[in-house]
Image (cartoon, rainbow, N blue to C red):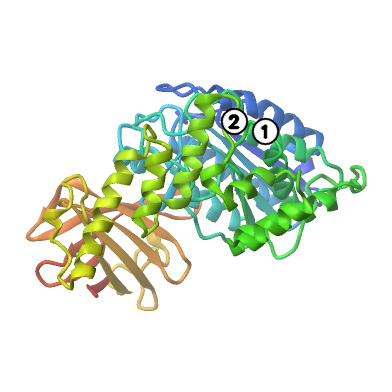
Amino acid sequence: MRSIVVTALLLTTPAFAQREGRIALILGDGKYTAVPDDTSVNGTSAVKSALASAGYKIVEASIISSDGMQWALDLLVRQLKKGGPESISIVYFAGYSIAANGENYLIPAHAKIAGRTDVIDQGFPLSRVLKALASAGNGANAVAIDACNGNPFYGDDTGFADVPLPTGVVLSTCAAPGTVAGPVGQNASFYAQGLSESMNVPGIGLVELFDVTRWSVGRNPGSYMLPWVKSGLTDEKSFAAPGNAGRAASLDAILAETALFGSAEQSDTSTGFQTYLDTYPNGAFARYARFALNPSTAPIETTATSASGSLDDMLWSGIKDTEDPSILQEYLTRFPDGKYVTTAKERIAVLQAGNQGTETGTETPPISAVPSTVVRPRIYTATLTGTDTAGWANLYLDICGRRIKYKATIEERSGTWSAELLNLDNNDMVTFRQTESGTRAGQAVMYGRYGLEGGTKNKVVLQVAPKSNGRVALNIPNIGVCAVGMVE
């Protein structure tokens, strides 16, 4: 039985064969087994209504497993291929998303998540959605991820990771990569509200849709996370179906303001943010610009709990990678009960230990001198070259062969191994993890799955022996070694 419930199946209607047909796939309904997500339920209704008004055929899928999500995605891609090069799609996911090992995983409703391993096993990689849409050969595709309601499963790995974006796809997330998602139980989805409002703007383009969503969220006084937009389109496409009303007169002014603030963010200089404030002193992004100019004096909002949480998250996201202990100390002073106090203290201890070694001319203290809670991973890299050993297997298509090269990034932390393997030919990424019995003859053995066209998932094995001969091998069970390399 398929692990999916499709509540509106309109994909087989003749409309999809027409020029510039539009299809929307809505994933998730908030019915999580472990932690209900009312935010998703509230936001999805407005988005669905706006999409229908813009001429999109709606498919709703209540996803309860990653297999069900793959089924719905395959269905969409097949219909896009039938619709031809002018068809346009939007995938809207509302629910929980967790970033683990550099990949964003969409969490199905019936997933049982207790830690990062469960996320990788049961979650659905966002990169798989992007690659599937890119394979459809249609005019343009957009993916909107409304998953800024924190990680209620085990309280870590929140936020988004940046991802490579294929040509022909626009990606929008409710918060930027590297920032922290909102508190669990947030009462309103500002992203869904802003997105649905933007969908009702006459004449708006597909990329413009998400730029205006950013503007709309920014001007909402209750929000504190700005959506993020990344485009792989070679040219702009109309969001709404042909025949809708002409372009709104206010649209270009909104886009100009959004572009100016975006330039300030890119430059990350006080001049850029001040220029924005001089031009738009009461603009949608004014409070974000003022915070960027002087985070220690950012205004406290009316609700103490939400304000403390929002400022805490915003300040930490901007300083978490700093090399200056005094900046981290400022965080401790401003937020003595903040959620990142322990992490800040550990980071200060590491930085101070390193500074002492530099100032006295002595070596940096050994790892044992750093608090025991700080575990430094060992990172290895390797370039793998494909072999022909397993290339005869048509099932595995072109993931083997002498022309294929892979780049492996391998991490060992406290005896536990993980890895990411990048296919340098097509930028496919495979994530590997080590099982409890994942060692043999001095090697670390990790397991992953290489997703191929049509949703087929094939197990692949990465064997690493950095402590003996340094050999790294990509192995397909029962077939042979697909690629080999050496630790660099």
Q: Is residue 476 visible?
A: no
Q: From the viewer's perspective, is the residue at label 1 or at label 2 nearer?
A: 2
Query: Dot 1: what SS?
Result: loop
For label 2, the residue is 301
Decide: is 112 above or below 405.
above
- The residue that appears at 69% across and 51% down in the rendered structure is 82
Q: Residue furthest bottom?
A: 403
The number of numbered badges drawn on the structure is 2
Q: Is residue 440 left or right of residue 27?
A: left
Of residues 176 and 125, the one drawn nearer to the viewer in this rendering:
176
Q: Is residue 143 left or right of residue 435?
A: right
The N terminus lies in quadrant: top left
- The residue that appears at 43% across and 71% down in the rendered structure is 424
Q: Are marks 1 and 2 in contact (CB under 8 Å)?
A: yes
Decide: is 257 above or below 32.
below
The C terminus lies in quadrant: bottom left
At which x and y percent is residue 131? 53, 56
At which x and y percent is residue 327? 40, 52
For label 1, the residue is 221
- The residue that appears at 66% across and 61% down in the rendered structure is 272
Q: Amino acid at mark 2?
A: Glu
What is the distance, in whole Å, between disc 1 and disc 2 at their CAs? 9 Å
Decide: is 390 above or below 96.
below
At which x and y percent is residue 452? 45, 55
Q: Amino acid at mark 1?
A: Pro
Of residues 394 and 446, the one drawn nearer to the viewer in this rendering:
446
Q: Residue furthest left?
A: 441
Q: Is residue 353 visible?
A: yes
At which x and y percent is residue 41? 59, 24
Of residues 383 and 21, the one drawn nearer to the viewer in this rendering:
383
- The residue that appears at 92% across and 43% down in the rendered structure is 245
Decide: is 167 above or below 96.
below
